[in-house]
Image: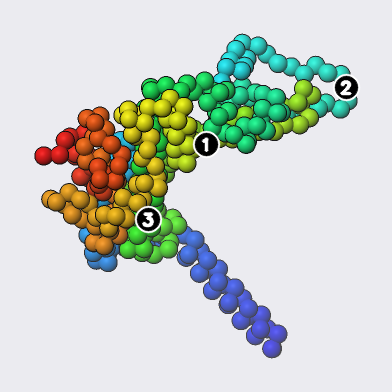
Amino acid sequence: MAVLLAGSLNSGWLGFFLIVTIFVANPIIWKIRKDRYFNSEEFQSLRAQVQTLVNEHNDIASYVSEIRSQGAFELGTSYTGQYAHLATFENSSKWNIRRDRNIAEYAPHVHNASLQVVRNASMEPIKYLMKYFDIKANKETLAEVQRMSNDIARLEEAIANLETREAEITSTINPPAFILNRYAKEFWDMVGVHLSPITVPYQTYKFEYVSAGGNSSQTVNIKLDTPTLEALSQALADKIRWAKSVAGQRALMTARLRAEIKERDHYTCQNSACGVSVAEEPNLLLEVDHIIPVSKGGTSEPHNLQTLCWRCNRSKGAKMPS
């Protein structure tokens, strides 16, 4: 009798768990729960609360796209193997042991070199980048490097700002876990923001050594991020000695100087008609602006620099102060 009773109880629990499993895994049930949440007062209230933050988020995302569309993010090219695509390579060796584990890469941003050149490039990346990728020390190159440096720095700050805002949006609306796990796209569509990945378009240049038999290889990668571009700007400015030129003045706008100006201005927009600060908006995106544009004779000295929020800087452009 006890055995039958135990078997009956076990069967009952098994049936119960089976019903629960079917209920939980049923897509119809998930859809009902989703629709109920999206039609709830809770969701409508949260949606209204987050709308201002979402609009600001989308504005900055548009600003990031605008910066990315302003110009290219690459400099010189290497001419090693520029016609390699016209030939077909085949290892026709009859040896049982073939040592072609490493195959040389031929591309505009890859320089195939001797082992000594690769090692030297690791010690003096700026010098070798200029020498082997045909980056000429002239006014035009300096201006282009500085434009890239400025755009990359603005992108880095804007994207970091976006990531902070996305985290705040997520924590503010705090939907049920099953919504984000199963219906994340529909959820973000309904609150009005698409969190598509936005990345900084760093161009990477590579020095590569591959032994004749392909048995060994060594590479050095140089990424054109803010520190690299600022070092390249300084090297170009020193080489051509145009410190008083427009390009030379822009070359002086380093990340450190921008940080010092923001701190001096107490992280507050210096436009008197705006005056917004990070104290009021913790996620405020700030930029450093030349009061008198360098194109009109302005310098990159602290007295000619001011902190502006991205909206005020965007509207000011290269206008002279009134």
Distance between the Cα atoms at labels 2 and 1?
A: 39 Å
- Tell me whether circle 1 and circle 3 mark residues in contact (CB < 8 Å): no
Residue drawn at (76%, 31%), measured in percent from left and top? 216
* Residue 223: image tag: 1
Q: Where is residue 102 in the image (x, y as percent from the top left)?
A: 73, 29
Whole-Å distance between the Cαs marked 3 and 2? 57 Å
Question: Do the CB atoms of the residues marked 3 and 2 lie less than 8 Å apart?
Answer: no
The residue lying toward the viewer, choosing from 116 and 23, is 116
Q: Is mark 3 on a helix, strand or loop?
A: helix
Judged left or right of residue 53, residue 150 is right
Residue located farthest toward the top when viewing the structure as drawn? 86
Please report the residue visible at 46 percent of the width from the left and 27 percent of the height from the top: 239
Rendered image quadrant of residue 140: top left
Viewer-side label of 2, 1 = 1
Disc 3: which residue = 164
Q: What residue type is labelled 2?
A: Trp
Give the mark, 3 or 2, whose residue is nearer the N terminus. Answer: 2
Look at 77% across and 18% down and name the residue there.
Answer: 91
**Residue identified by numbered label 2:** 95
Instruction: Give how far across and how far down residue 238 sits, in percent.
Output: 45, 30
Q: Are marks 2 and 1 in contact (CB under 8 Å)?
A: no
Amino acid carrying mark 3 in the image:
Thr
